[in-house]
Image: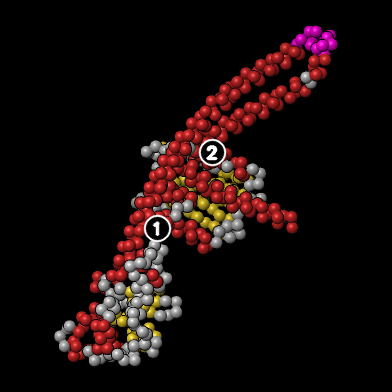
Amino acid sequence: MTQKFRPDISPPFLSGGSDRDLNLQSTLQELQLYNFQVETSATAAEVAKVFEKYPLLPGVVLVEEGNYTGMISRRRLLELFIRPYGQELFFQQSLAIFYSYARTPVLLLADSTSILAAMQLAMRRSPELMAEPVVVKTESDIYFLLDVQELNIACWQIRGIETQVRYERSQIQMIQNDKMASLGRLVDGIAHEILDPVGFIWGNLTYISKYSQDLLKLIAVCEKTFPELTKEIIYFKEEIEFDFIEQDLSRVLTSVYTGAERLKKLVTSLQNFCHIDEVYPKPADLHRCIDNILLLINSRIKKEIQVIKNYGHLPPVYCFIGQLHQVFMNILSQAVDVLLDEAVRLQLNQAVDGKVEIPRIEINTSVISQPSHNPQIPDSRWVSIRITDNGPGMSKEFQQQIIESFSVEKRADKETSLAVSYRIVTARHGGKFHLRSEVGIGTEFEILLPLV
């Protein structure tokens, strides 16, 4: 062994083994990385002796005065040696000369690259390079070798973990769906039971109003016919404050009527929200769907948040209306949460400078056209629902995290309400789900549903 081999290669790997705990976010740092760097002035014979001593070494990293030059795999070295006169020509030659004949494209990756991403890049190489090792670079500019077989095994382990996670999540989702379906049926039954007495009140309010007006008219006729009232009647009218009752009765009836109407709408909205979709989509009124959700969360909005509705002319849209209820609930609830926090901050600022902007949610609906890339195919028509708030907005990094949560890998790890909404819009309805946000201006969610 000559002194031209700079790093110590005993043992020739840094980490890894049978006890490693891989997951979906595992990187190349967690695999066996071989540390074998050699100056190009060394000979091929010296490298062959090291390969003979360490049969697991996939190759050698070439450096020239400490700077990375390239990589020669064990396979390429053996291929040149077994050629006719290969040993006579290359065995005692320097690696610089040897590399000029054995040079092949090298896949160079950072050690922070995920194992799954590295496997995808390795599989995209040409067939003759599929068995070549991967060169891994650390932040400190040290180069290591990764055996592609090791990468394959790790990738299959992670795929198995991903499959297991998806299976467990699917089981949990089935249980959760069953619970939600049972809860939906329970809430629907309770709402139905509430609607029955509300119906009695609603149906009898008209008669109560008519009967009370008739009784007041009767009393007025009696007073006109018998102007001289007895002391007992006069005393009783004063005791029950008849003049006040006569004026306030209509207001009381109006208040009861308004309360019954509000309760009826609220229970109906609750029934619509708990609606269980059928197998096939059906036409639905999206404006009514949005209004139902706004009515359900109205107790949280109160007077702190201004809701502006700019509804366009929308035809009935074929959809799973129960699932769209969930989408609008998720988006509007998130907007309300952000704006309520912002409202508290703005109230504090108002106490300092006297200026405040009212938190606002704006809902715009319209039918839009999107041009087709094929001139023979007509433009596609979509229903656009844009929900915009004037909250603090999101940073680019946070937006990227949300968009990444829409991917299959992230859903297998953790599923958020926005990820559920994305899947409902895109997978279940063939639509599009867009997120736009700017710090200090606000956030907009746009839902596009195809018009069939």
Query: Which residue shows up at 35% across the image and 80% down it?
Result: 35
Residue 147, x across and y down, in percent: 30, 73
What kind of residue is marked 2?
A: Asn
Q: Comparing marks 1 and 2, which lies closer to the viewer? A: 1
Residue 289's label in the rendered image is: none
Residue bearing mark 1? 409
Query: Which residue shows up at 70% across the image and 53% down it?
Result: 347
Residue 62, x across and y down, in percent: 33, 84
Query: Which residue shows up at 68% across the image and 54% down it?
Result: 346
Between the C-alphas of marks 1 and 2, the distance is 34 Å
Residue 447, x across and y down, in percent: 48, 49
Label 2 residue SS: helix
Comparing 227 with 131, the one in front is 131
Query: Which residue shows up at 76% across the image and 13% down it?
Result: 220
**Is residue 105 in sight in this rendering?**
yes
Magenta stretch containing residue 378, yes or no? no
Q: What stretch is highlighted in magenta?
A: 221-234
For residue 350, side relative to residue 41 (left or right): right
Residue 292's label in the rendered image is: 2
- 116 lies above or below 145: above
What kind of residue is marked 1?
A: Glu
**Is residue 275 in sight in this rendering?**
no
Q: Which of marks 1 and 2 is nearer the N terminus?
A: 2
**For the stretch drawn in magenta, what is the main secondary structure?**
helix
Residue 52, x across and y down, in percent: 24, 83
Quadrant including the C terminus: top left
Count residues near mark 1 (Cα–Cα under 10 Å), then give few for <14, some for 14-19, many for 20+: some
Label 1 residue SS: helix
Picture quadrant of residue 394: bottom right
